[in-house]
Image: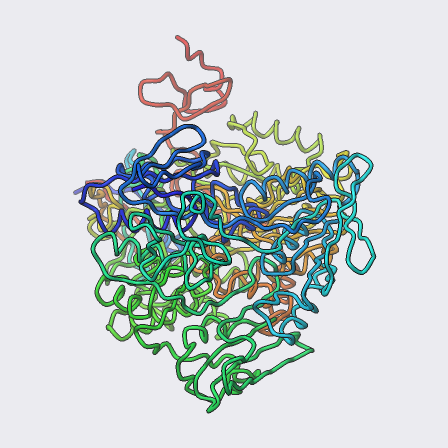
């Protein structure tokens, strides 16, 4: 069983907005989607190296929830980490972290 | 080939040869006596609107072709037709098989006594306009007062020259020998209407008057202009614009046939009496007439290119149209202006209240269009002129009465109708550009056909034809913002405004699909802010904001932010400077003066932003919105308060404007500048809105830009008092905000505005669309509801909770940040450099070790 780290309560998350969290020493960006699902990906933007992805814009590409980097606007699938728009660069996928909901509490698992 | 003359027509010829004969081997020497590369003489007056001569240069295509050699600043002196050589003043001898004369015209001046005095100018070449500007500057300095000027000649060019004098701050008079202005192009009624408009601009008009003598001032420069009515007017600068004559001396001396009224005699192929020599443009005499416009010259250049390449095209003089431009008053005419055709009928509509005059000349059965005269409102000119000699398709009066005024003919013009007479492009060619060459926009068609690239007057018609053709070929030009919204920003703005929508979810449900993206969400955020829907971080708006807006700071490469408080007008007290110094020192922020007369502090972590801003707000600072698509700063010079030359209080006005428009969200960022005198130290004309002080008030310019595509702002209104200035800027900004596209700066918005500055002036100054009250109210609402974004954020724990390093470990912060020292301040460290995670300590690192 993977170790899990407490992030916050669901009520602490705004729809389609991210928060930064520290999970087992790793920086993670946690998002609440429009349908109240909660997902988590790495906080580090692989293109700039800055830890900023929680500050990106959440939207959709087709039916897929998507995240745009606040730095250079690459777009990823928030559920798989797949790079959907590398903005002219080589696509680089994000690490996705499993999220557990325990009542109102949101936990992120370290793989 | 040798081409003598390097003006617009020579350029057209060289360009045509290069384009139509891309692979053949030939060589061409183009000899021009002006020092500059061939430039757009048609738009020479734009020099006074801030365009440099090198910006008027014609596109250099042919000059970069290795087969073409361009010689400037050297005049052809002789032609030896037996040896087939041209010799220049510098001794260059150019041999030819084919010689093309494109020597153009010279400005004729009557033999009035005193035309040799300093301060007397022609108005034809780059040297003329540069000399004129320099003279006005020098003379103003010497005399220590505003100048008075006179233009002799009230034709199109004379009126342009008078407007140029006004731009230079000179009070001009126009003296015209005929009984009306633009006597060649306008009938009595049109001339009278134009006189009213020109006089209304503050230009003194004297018709039926001749200049008899120029008198000297005590220092020998020109000082007075004596007139045929035995009066004299003071004149510190005089411009003669009394007609042009073909430059045919070379041809005459080499024995070529010369027309009775001058000009090199050519036949329909533009060949002269020597089979090896051709003549094109204003120096060529066709059926005893020389033209003075660029369009026939271009047509002749095309004919000679075709003939040289084995074609059979010939030149026929087409009826010409003329449009007054760059004066701030509209007048245009085409065809049989005076109704001289047998049986011609004239239908006239004059409106002295609206100060417009419109006349159509039609055949005796009222069916065929023979000519038109338009003064004050020339909206019919570009759409009707192509119909010259063709069925009008409706009762003439239907076009002229106000209700019918907009009912221009449909875009179903026959294929052979010339749409752009400057570049000689027909409606068929425009349609083919879309259907056969894959053009999908007016810009594409311009680049492909050159239509609309010279005087621009056909662009509205061109746009209509291009759009109709696109629709018919089934090409829908996508104006969709992104996959979520199928409409452009301005349309979405109008919908949201009309329906009073207030959240992204409402808007996307009603007008889009999906959950948005990094393109449309910030646009919606901007629209909501523009419509006054609360704080940018309130409710669902926070999640729409782009990177910078969501932290109310500018994101830097390492994930930290810069902090830029507002410093209105660049004016700051010593006490506030101390606060900035202390804050920067305490947080280890890299500090720098910005280009917008403010102070930026770099390297603030997201969790530090509220701490920093609390101290700044306590000291009386507020957000500078350097992060927003909104007003940045109002840059100014120190102005009348301190400057020896200032004529108005530029800092005071800059502060007033900055406090008025602070925080106003717009389609893109916008900048404002205020200069206290014509020296323009604030570089205001490089701004979206530029304000320049005059002795009588303020001139306001709009649509300027620096950056990647520099553009000088264009004059919108003159000599306004403080309140009138503010109102004009209010309307300009509000109109831009509601109608510009996403991320469209004012420069392209103004440049692409249908009808150009003249139309924009009508909308903003004369309220021709009836929008003024709404526009005024929108800015008034903004001013009333303004609140500092940082102060209100600091007062709201809900907003503050997002400024956190880690939601589950607020005491920790990003361990990857690393700083080193440079020139005594911190900057992000590169891999391998000595570094410290805290910039306060990094500043003191010894990086030499």
Q: Quadrant of the C terminus of chain B?
A: top left
Q: Position of residue B319 (x, y in %)?
A: 44, 70
* As drawn, B201 above or below B117: below
Colour mapping used in the image:
rainbow
Q: Position of residue B530 (x, y in %)?
A: 53, 61
Q: Position of residue B576 (x, y in %)?
A: 68, 33
Q: Quadrant of the N terminus of chain B?
A: top left
Quarter residue B219 falls in: top right
Residue B793 visible (yes or no): no
Task: Report the label total.
Answer: 0
Which one is in front, B611 or B486? Answer: B486
* As drawn, B690 above or below B469: above
In the image, farthest residue toward the bottom? B365
Quarter residue B307 falls in: bottom left
Position of A55 with respect to B581 (left or right) is: left
What residue appears at the point 51 percent right and 18 percent down from the top-left corner?
Answer: B824
Position of B763 with respect to B830 (left or right) is: right
Residue B416 visible (yes or no): yes
What residue appears at the point 67 percent right and 68 percent down from the top-left corner?
Answer: B180
Q: Position of residue B285 (x, y in %)?
A: 43, 58
Which one is in front, B298 or B682? Answer: B298
Which one is in front, B737 or A12? Answer: B737
Position of A12 with respect to B184 (left or right) is: left
Which one is in front, B42 or B481? Answer: B42
* As drawn, B35 above or below B175: above
What residue appears at the point 60 percent right and 54 percent down from the top-left corner?
Answer: B715
């Amino acid at each position: 069983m993977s170790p899990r780290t407490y992030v916050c309560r669901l009520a602490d998350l705004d729809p389609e907005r991210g928060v930064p969290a520290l999970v087992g020493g790793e920086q993670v960006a946690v998002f609440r989607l429009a349908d109240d699902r909660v997902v988590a990906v790495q906080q580090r933007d692989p293109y700039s190296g800055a830890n900023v992805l929680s500050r990106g814009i959440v939207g959709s590409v087709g039916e897929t929830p998507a995240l745009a980097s606040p730095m250079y606007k690459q777009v990823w699938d928030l559920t798989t980490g797949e790079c959907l728009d590398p903005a002219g660069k080589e696509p680089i996928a994000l690490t996705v972290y499993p999220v557990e909901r325990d009542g109102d509490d949101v936990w992120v698992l370290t793989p | 080939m040798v081409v003598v003359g390097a003006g617009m027509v020579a350029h057209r010829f060289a360009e045509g040869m290069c384009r139509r004969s891309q692979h053949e081997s030939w060589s061409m020497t183009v000899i021009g006596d002006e020092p500059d590369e061939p430039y757009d003489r048609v738009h020479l007056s734009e020099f006074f609107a801030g365009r440099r001569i090198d910006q008027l240069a014609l596109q250099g295509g042919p000059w970069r072709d290795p087969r073409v050699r361009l010689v400037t600043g050297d005049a052809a002196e002789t032609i030896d037709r037996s040896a087939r050589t041209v010799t220049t003043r510098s001794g260059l001898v150019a041999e030819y098989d084919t010689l093309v004369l494109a020597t153009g015209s010279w400005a004729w001046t009557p033999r009035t006594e005193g035309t040799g005095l300093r301060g007397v100018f022609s108005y034809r070449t780059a040297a003329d306009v540069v000399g004129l500007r320099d003279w006005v500057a020098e003379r103003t300095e010497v005399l220590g007062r505003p100048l008075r000027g006179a233009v002799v000649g009230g034709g199109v060019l004379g009126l342009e020259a008078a407007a140029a004098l006004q731009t230079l701050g000179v009070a001009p008079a126009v003296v015209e020998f005929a009984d009306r202005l633009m006597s060649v192009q306008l009938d009595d009624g049109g001339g009278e209407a134009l006189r009213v408009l020109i006089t209304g601009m503050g230009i003194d008009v004297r018709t039926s008057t001749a200049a008899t003598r120029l008198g000297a001032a005590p220092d020998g420069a020109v000082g007075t202009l004596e007139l045929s009515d035995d009066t004299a007017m003071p004149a510190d600068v005089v411009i003669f614009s009394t007609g042009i004559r073909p430059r045919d001396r070379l041809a005459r001396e080499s024995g070529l046939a010369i027309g009775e009224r001058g000009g090199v005699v050519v036949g329909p192929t533009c060949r002269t009496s020597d089979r090896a020599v051709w003549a094109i443009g204003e120096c060529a005499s066709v059926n005893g007439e020389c033209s003075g416009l660029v369009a026939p010259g271009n047509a002749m250049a095309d004919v000679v290119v075709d003939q040289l390449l084995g074609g059979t095209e010939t030149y026929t003089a087409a009826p010409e149209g003329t449009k007054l431009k760059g004066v701030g008053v509209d007048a245009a005419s085409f065809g049989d202006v005076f109704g001289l055709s047998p049986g011609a009928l004239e239908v006239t509509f004059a409106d002295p209240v609206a100060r417009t005059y419109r006349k159509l000349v039609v055949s005796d059965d009222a069916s065929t269009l023979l000519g038109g005269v338009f003064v004050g409102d020339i909206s019919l000119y570009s759409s009707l002129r192509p119909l010259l000699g063709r069925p009008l398709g409706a009762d003439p009066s239907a076009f002229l009465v106000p209700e019918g005024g907009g009912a221009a003919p449909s875009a179903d013009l026959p294929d052979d109708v010339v749409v752009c007479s400057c570049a000689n492009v027909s409606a068929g060619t425009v349609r083919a550009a879309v259907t056969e060459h894959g053009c999908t926009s007016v810009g594409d068609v311009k680049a492909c056909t050159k239509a609309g690239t010279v005087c621009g007057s056909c662009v509205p018609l061109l746009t209509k034809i291009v759009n109709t053709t696109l629709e018919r070929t089934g090409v829908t030009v996508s104006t969709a913002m992104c996959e979520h919204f199928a409409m452009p920003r301005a349309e979405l703005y109008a919908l949201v405004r009309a329906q009073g929508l207030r959240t992204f979810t409402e808007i996307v449900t009603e007008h889009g699909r999906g959950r948005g993206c990094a393109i449309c969400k910030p646009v919606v955020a901007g629209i909501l802010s523009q419509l006054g829907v609360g704080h940018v971080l309130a409710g669902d708006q926070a999640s729409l904001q782009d990177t910078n807006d969501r932290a109310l700071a500018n994101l830097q490469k390492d994930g930290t932010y810069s902090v830029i408080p507002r410093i209105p007008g660049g004016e700051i007290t010593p006490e506030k400077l101390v606060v900035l110094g202390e804050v920067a020192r305490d947080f280890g922020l890299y500090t720098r003066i910005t280009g917008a007369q403010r102070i930026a502090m770099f390297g603030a972590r997201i969790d530090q932003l509220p701490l920093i801003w609390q101290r700044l707000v306590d000291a009386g600072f507020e957000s500078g919105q350097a992060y927003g698509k909104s007003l940045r700063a109002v840059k100014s010079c120190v102005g009348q308060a301190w400057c020896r030359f200032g004529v108005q209080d530029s800092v005071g006005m800059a502060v007033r404007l900055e406090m008025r428009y602070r925080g106003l969200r717009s389609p893109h960022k916008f900048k404002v500048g205020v200069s206290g005198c014509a020296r323009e130290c604030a570089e205001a004309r490089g701004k979206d809105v530029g304000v320049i002080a005059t002795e009588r008030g303020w001139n306001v310019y709009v649509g300027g830009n620096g950056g990647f595509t520099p553009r000088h702002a264009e004059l919108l209104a003159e000599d306004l008092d403080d309140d009138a200035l503010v109102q004009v800027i209010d309307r300009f900004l509000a109109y831009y905000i509601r109608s510009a596209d996403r991320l469209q700066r004012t420069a392209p918005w103004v440049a692409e505005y249908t009808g150009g500055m003249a139309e924009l002036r009508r909308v903003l100054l004369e309220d021709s669309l009836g929008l003024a009250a709404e526009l005024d109210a929108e800015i008034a609402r903004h001013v009333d509801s303004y609140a500092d974004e940082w102060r209100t954020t600091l007062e709201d724990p809900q907003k503050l909770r997002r400024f956190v390093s880690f939601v589950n470990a607020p005491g920790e912060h990003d361990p990857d940040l690393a700083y080193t020292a440079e020139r005594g301040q911190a900057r992000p460290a590169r891999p391998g450099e000595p570094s410290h995670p805290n910039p306060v300590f990094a500043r003191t690192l010894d990086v030499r070790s």
